[in-house]
Structures are given as structure tokens and as C-alpha cells.
Amino acid sequence: MLLLIIKRMANAIFVILAVSLLAFTIFKFLGDPVQLMLNPQATQQERDQLTERLGLNDPVPVQFAKFVFNAARGEFGMSYRNQMPVMEVIAERFPATFELVLVSSILALLIGLPLGVFAAIRGGTVMARVFHLISMIGVSVPAFVIGILLILVFSIELKWLPAFGRGKVVDLGFWTTGFLTPSGRAALVMPSISLALFQISFIMRLVTAEMLEVLRTDFIRFAKARGLKARAIYFRHGLRNCMMPVVTMTGMLIGDLIAFTLVTEIVFQWPGMGFLFVQSVQYVDIPVMAAYLMIVCCIFITINLIVDLIYVVVDPRVDQLVRGGGNGH
């Protein structure tokens, strides 16, 4: 497992450098930082001083090296719009996005996995067909349409849930959470469902397809011949042997949720990182945009590493393949 981690970390460094170059390009060539940070009445001396302080007179390779060094320390400069360190601005918004993604991911796994197994086992029943139809709707309808429909029904018509915002939150010092207040939990319901519906449908369809393949194998026939209980056959042997692609896709979906919650956050005015990124684009807040790009990259890399480690836990042969240089069978 250690060799697997080392190989993945080496790959991650190359990916981070490539994304750093993209973020630096945005930072360097999208707009004039001096003009954006100073007011129009600033003198030429003030402009020259700020240019020197930002290191904009250095050669481009030197500027890129400084950018990577500062990014590794979590320093992305000051937000043009908020006049605060970028990481402080993002840290304020991260808990909102994390809690939204956490609830959506739990919903997707708790609902998608058993529904997928049920649809594979009871494929010809009316209930399985209903689930299949719902999954088709979940995959086909965009998240913002689901969000608007939820607001129309549960906020405007029934007045059960808040239409926007995060509700009342509790500040724990290092984290602000809505889990500890009724209005915070109520505010999470509709955005979570809107965000999770696609993931539920996708996981359900993926598990169903993989389970149908596994259930046709001699391994399962042998398990039935041994007289094992149906629950053990389907969940212990069947579901476990189809988890590799499910783990892969679920990890990628969670990364997508964190990176691309902006549509849901805009619909529900959810004060998370996605909403912050949209505001940054609107106000040309380049440091925040560059930092967001780097953070999303690191999140994806971390999730992929976790997925690789889960591979080894689910199927130890993966570790043997890595140690054998990928030539084992």
C-alpha cells in the first residue's frame, strides 16, 4: 500500500504543477492586478510601489515559482473584492459547501446502493420499473430545474421549508455548522435533495448493471448451490464484487459535488464555495478564482487517493498488481 501511495503522490505532484500553471496564467494575464487593487485616483508612484511589492517586475518563471511556493503554503494574496486574505474568505465558505456535499453524498449512498441491488434482484417487478423510471428522471432533469420545482412546492405552496439561505448557524470557532439548529437543518433539506438526485440515480443504475453481471457468474451459482441465504449471496458476495466501479464513480461524483455545487448554491442562495466562485467571476476577483481552482484540484487528488486506498481494502489484488508493476493477472 505504501508503494501505491508513493506512486499516486508522484502523479499528484505533476497534476498540481499543471493546474498551478493554469491558475498562474489566470492570475497573470486575466486583468491588471494593480489597476484592480488601486482606486482610479492612485498616483503613478503608488502604482509602481504596488507593482514592485507584488513582484510583477520579476521574470515570468520567477513569478511562477513564487506562485507555486506561496500556494503550497496556502497563500494566495488578498481578495480584491473583500480586502481579506483569500484563504480566510474561502475558509468562511467551505463549511457550508462541505456540509451540503456530506449530506448529499450520504443520501446518494444510502438510497442509491439498496435501490440498485433491489432493481437487479427484482428486475421484472412493478416496483423495480418505477425505480428505474425515477432514476431516468433523476439523470435527465438538470439540478436547477429540480431545485426550482422543490422551491415552488415546499417553500411557496406548502411553506414547509426555507427557499434560500443556510438558516441559523452555530460558530464553533474553527467551524460554522447548521447541523445544530432547526433552521440550519431545514435549510439543508432541499439543496441536498436537489444535489443528490442525480447521484442517487447514477449510483442506482451503476449498481444494477454491475450486480446483473456478477449474478450471472459461476461464483454466485456456486454460492446458491451451497445453500447460502439470499442476503449473504446478494450483499456479502454479489455487492462486494461489484463495488470497484461503484467506489470509483462515487469518489469522482463526490469530487464533482464539491467542485460544481455552484448551480445548486446559486438556486438556493447557499453561501458556499460555488456561490463565492460565481461572485469572484462577476467581480473579477482573480486571487479567489485561482485559489478555488487549486483547492478543487487538491480535493480531486485527495479523493482519488482515497479511492485507490479503498481499492486495496476491497480487493487486495490491486496492491499486488501495483507492486508487480501492473503486469500481474
Image: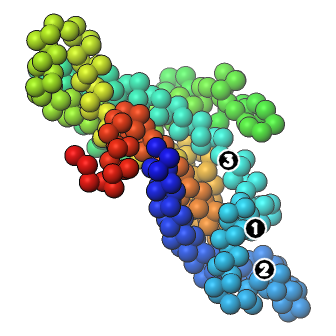
Mark 2 secondary-structure assignment: loop
Q: Which residue is mark 1?
A: 77
Residue at 64% from the left image edge and 62% from the top image edge = 291
Q: Which residue is mark 3?
A: 93
Above or below residue 234? Residue 82 is: below
Instruction: State which tag comes first along the sequence, 3 or 2.
Output: 2
For residue 54, the mark is: 2
Q: Amino acid at mark 3?
A: Arg
Q: Look at the image and tell me whether residue 268 can be seen.
A: yes
Instruction: State which tag comes first along the sequence, 1 or 3.
Output: 1
Mark 3 secondary-structure assignment: helix
308 left or right of 184 in image: left
Point out the residue furthest to the bottom here: 44
Marks 1 & 3, CB-CB < 8 Å contact: no
Front tag of 1 and 3: 1
Residue 138 appears at what percent x and percent y?
32, 37
Residue 226 appears at what percent x and percent y?
14, 10
* Mark 1 neighbour class, 10 Å CA radius: few under 14, some 14 to 19, many 20 or more: some
Marks 1 & 2, CB-CB < 8 Å contact: yes
Above or below residue 161? Residue 282 is: below
Above or below residue 133? Residue 300 is: below
Q: CA distance from mark 1 to mark 2?
A: 9 Å
Q: Amino acid at mark 2?
A: Leu
Quadrant in the picture for residue 109: top left
Residue at 22% from the left image edge and 7% from the top image edge = 229
Residue at 53% from the left image edge and 38% from the top image edge = 101
Residue 115 appears at what percent x and percent y?
29, 23
